[in-house]
Amino acid sequence: MPVMEEVPFITTPDNVTVSMLELAGVNAKDFVLDLGSGDGRIVITAARRFGARGLGVEIVPELVERSQRNAQAAGVTDRAEFREQDLFKTDLTAASVITMYLLPAVNLQLRPALLRLKPGTRLVSHDWDMGEWTPDRTLTVEAPTKNIGREKLSQLHLWVVPAPAAGLWCGDAGLQWHLRQQFQMVQGQAGPTADLKALLGHMDATTLHLWAPGAQARAEWQTSPQGPTLRVVGASGAWGPWQGQTLRKASGDRCTA
Ligand SMILES: C[S@@+](CC[C@H](N)C(=O)[O-])C[C@H]1O[C@@H](n2cnc3c(N)ncnc32)[C@H](O)[C@@H]1O
């Protein structure tokens, strides 16, 4: 792993913590993972105020101990756990929400692993973005008690992990979608085999929205033991007849009958 700038301990102000959790829509069904959890405030607030479960991983032992004391004082030790652990060696897959207040280079280093998470996993970063992976939402909140920066403002970014849709998808009656994907943005061609039309799309967690002039479709991405499928759950205009079709991912570069 390349050597990188160390992430210092700087706390997220309380009002910003609440805004981060609200931006992610945290609720009692969530498991919140804070990468570099400092004094534990994000996980403790997620448990106390939103009823979620959570884990904070932190590399400084004294901060882990402080977090555990803070969790005890807040009465949430049954739902808020803290471990002395390197965030780069942490299993991210159990989380439904991941929070970060790190550094731009660290976010970028985490990005490939974050993109492989279960589609729909929500990611919130305080202040730093993830380069070309543009956030699904960005919020600026006032942060009068922030202990760095002259402008007492915080930027909060939300990403929802998109399902992977790149490849050739095959339906009935020659329906084909050739899709390319960059993060949540999708482009490609669609049509019965001989009549491919350029299309644009957006993957919103597991819902793919596709557009072409005079046509729109919405498809739900799912996995099954046979591989991923896209089921057309809404189609209008020239694509109306596709409604209800299920497209399967081709294993090669052709759709077989
Ligand atoms: C900017 S603070 C954020 C603390 C807390 N998440 C918050 O928002 O208030 C970043 C924290 O990450 C911790 N940290 C830095 N590198 C880490 C690593 N590789 N693994 C785990 N924690 C790390 C630092 O010790 C520091 O407490």
Image: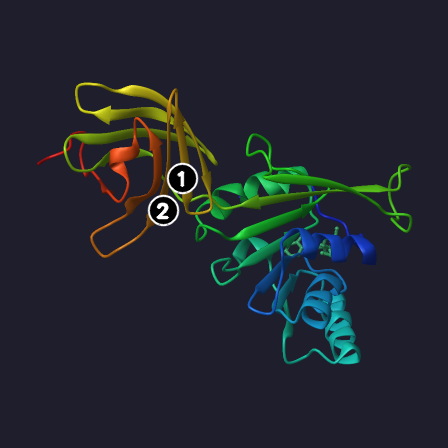
The amino acid type of the residue labelled 2 equals: Glu
C-alpha distance separating marks 2 and 1: 6 Å
Colour convention of the picture: rainbow
Q: Is 114 on the left-hand or right-hand side of 58?
A: left
Q: Residue at x 69, y 55 (%)?
A: 22
- The residue that mark 2 highlights is 220
Is the C-beta separation of discs 2 and 1 under 8 Å?
A: yes
Say if residue 168 shows up in the picture: no
In this image, 231 relative to 106: left or right?
left
- Return the x and y of residue 116 as percentages of the image width and height: 43, 47
Q: Residue at x 74, y 70 (%)?
A: 67
Q: From the viewer's side, name the closer residue of 59 and 72.
A: 72
Task: Give the quarter of the figure containing the C terminus.
Answer: top left
| Amino acid type assigned to the residue bearing label 1 in the image | Leu
Residue under numbered circle 1: 208
Q: Residue at x 64, y 64 (%)?
A: 56
Q: Position of residue 32 (x, y in %)?
A: 60, 62
Give me the disc on residue 36: none
Q: Earlier in the sequence, mark 2 or mark 1?
A: 1
Q: Secondary structure at mark 2?
A: strand
In this orientation, which residue lies closer to the viewer: 112 or 173? 173
Measuring 60% from the left and 61% from the top, which residue is drawn there? 33
Q: Residues within 10 Å of mark 2 (few under 14, many from 20)?
A: some
x%, y% of residue 39? 77, 64
Q: Dot 1, how many residues are within 10 Å of its Cα: few (below 14), some (14-19), or many (20+)?
A: many
Label 2 CB less than 8 angstroms from ligand 1: no
Image vertical order of residue 149 relative to residue 227, above or below = above
Percent position of residue 40, x then y: 73, 65
Q: How many marks?
A: 2
- Choose top left, top right, bottom left or bottom right for residue 74: bottom right
Which residue reaches farthest left? Answer: 257
Residue sitting nearer the eye, 8 or 182 = 182
